[in-house]
Image (tube, helix red, strand yellow):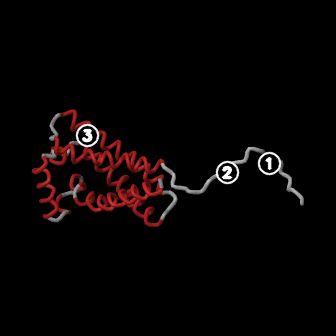
Amino acid sequence: MGALLKLVDALLFLVFLLLAFISPLIDFQLIFPQTLFPDFLIDLKASYIHQYGDYLMAESPPFVVGLVWLELLFQWPLMLLNLYAFLASKPWYNTTCLIYGVSVVASMSAILGEMVGSNRASTTLLTIYYPFLGFGVLAMLRGLVSCSSKATVTGTRPSNGRKKRA
């Protein structure tokens, strides 16, 4: 179990690191003025939209804009906290992973529900988005698993409060 947990932690760390850079550069273009971003990033987003037909990124419906604000104000700081907690071996890493995972699963459920329900998303576009749902589930499960190797011993007899004498 320990090796599997380390593998999951390494995978989560790599995805957190990747998303910590991609989110502000690509996703935040939906909520901030284009003048704040260099031309190559605007072109990269436009190329992605054209190549994969991501109509949610192209049209920016209000619920997606709201989810990007959620990402900026809640998920992105949690992602940075997770990176720090992983590197510094903080005991609250499980908690922040759980919170982040639940938030991502909720966000991706809304996005994938729209994509599948509208029948506008191609199979290729869905294969881009589904791994994010899986990543959220993985982060959530990681938050639920304790990595403590200490055995806790609970006595069955109540303490009588007196010290034993030799």
The residue located at (21%, 43%) in the rendering is 126
Circle 1 SS class:
loop
Give the number of the mark in front: 1 or 3: 1
Using the image, determine if residue 87 lies above or below residue 76.
Answer: below
Residue carrying label 1:
159
**Sequence-wise, which precedes: disc 2 or disc 3?**
3
Residue type at tag 1: Ser
Q: Is residue 121 left or right of residue 75?
A: left
Give the number of the mark in front: 2 or 1: 2
The residue located at (45%, 50%) in the rendering is 143
> What's the CA distance linking mark 2 and mark 3?
45 Å
Tell me the quarter of the picture where residue 81 sits: bottom left
Q: Position of residue 43 (x, y in %)?
A: 12, 59
Q: Position of residue 29 (x, y in %)?
A: 21, 56
Q: Residues within 10 Å of mark 3 (few under 14, many from 20)?
A: some
The front one of 71 and 10 is 10
The front one of 104 and 87 is 87
In the image, farthest residue toward the right:
166
Residue carrying label 2:
153
Residue carrying label 3:
112
The front one of 44 and 2 is 2
The front one of 93 and 155 is 155
Residue type at tag 3: Leu
